[in-house]
Amino acid sequence: MNLYKKVEYLLYNYKNLKAEIKNIELEIESIANDYNSSLAISYEEKSAPTNKISSSVENKVVSKEEKIKYLQDIKRNKEIQVQKIDNALESLAERDKKVIELRYFEKISNKKLAERLDLTEQRVSEIKSIIVNNLIKLIFV
């Protein structure tokens, strides 16, 4: 996928990225809450001694810690993508920012965008292309 298409993909999925970050936070919280309940003390009577080095509770704790770490890494990568987009959009002129918001975030067609901005569809496509090419330089440094 070329950089132009990558930027368009990021812009089209910007709102989804933000929602994914929130959902990952909820998943981490859920795992952490479940993690705390796993640490409950068991008063069962041991039936026989074992040479097993780690207990099932220890294995569960390690597994949950690994899952939380994995989710935190994914979340951080998504946060970085969102921040790069935010930083790039801050550098745009108001009109250019409006074009991006309407076209990619609100998914308005070029035709409707042209009507809103009182431009031709061809001019909207040209402007969009220029903006996306500028964003490439800012997002993929």
Image: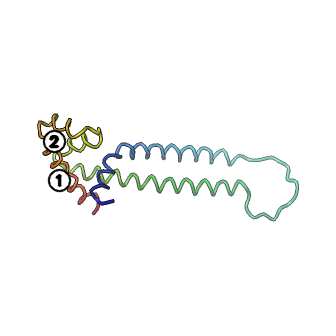
Q: Which amino acid type corresponds to the residue marked 1 in the rendered image?
A: Ile
Residue 131 placement (x, y as % from top left): 19, 51
Secondary structure, mark 2, is: helix
Q: Name the residue under label 1.
A: 130
Left or right of 20: which side holds 10? Answer: left
| Residue at x-position 85% and y-position 49% | 45
Real-space Cα distance between discs 2 and 1?
Answer: 14 Å
Q: Mark 2 points at which residue?
A: 121
Whether label 2 touches label 1, CB < 8 Å? no
Of the 4 image quadrants, the one containing the C terminus is bottom left
Residue 54 placement (x, y as % from top left): 73, 61
Counting the numbered discs, the total is 2
Left or right of 68: which side holds 87? Answer: left
Left or right of 139: which side holds 30? Answer: right
| Residue at x-position 43% and y-position 54% | 76
Q: How crowded is mark 1: few (under 14 residues within 10 Å), some or many (20 or more)?
A: few
Secondary structure, mark 1, is: helix
From the image, state whether disc 2 or disc 1 is nearer to you.
2
Coloring scheme used: rainbow
Front residue of 19 and 40: 19
| Residue at x-position 24% and y-position 49% | 89
Of the 4 image quadrants, the one containing the N terminus is bottom left
Q: Which amino acid type corresponds to the residue marked 2 in the rendered image?
A: Glu
Q: Earlier in the sequence, mark 2 or mark 1?
A: 2
Say above or below: 18 vs 65: above
Quarter holding residue 137:
bottom left
Front residue of 98 and 45: 98
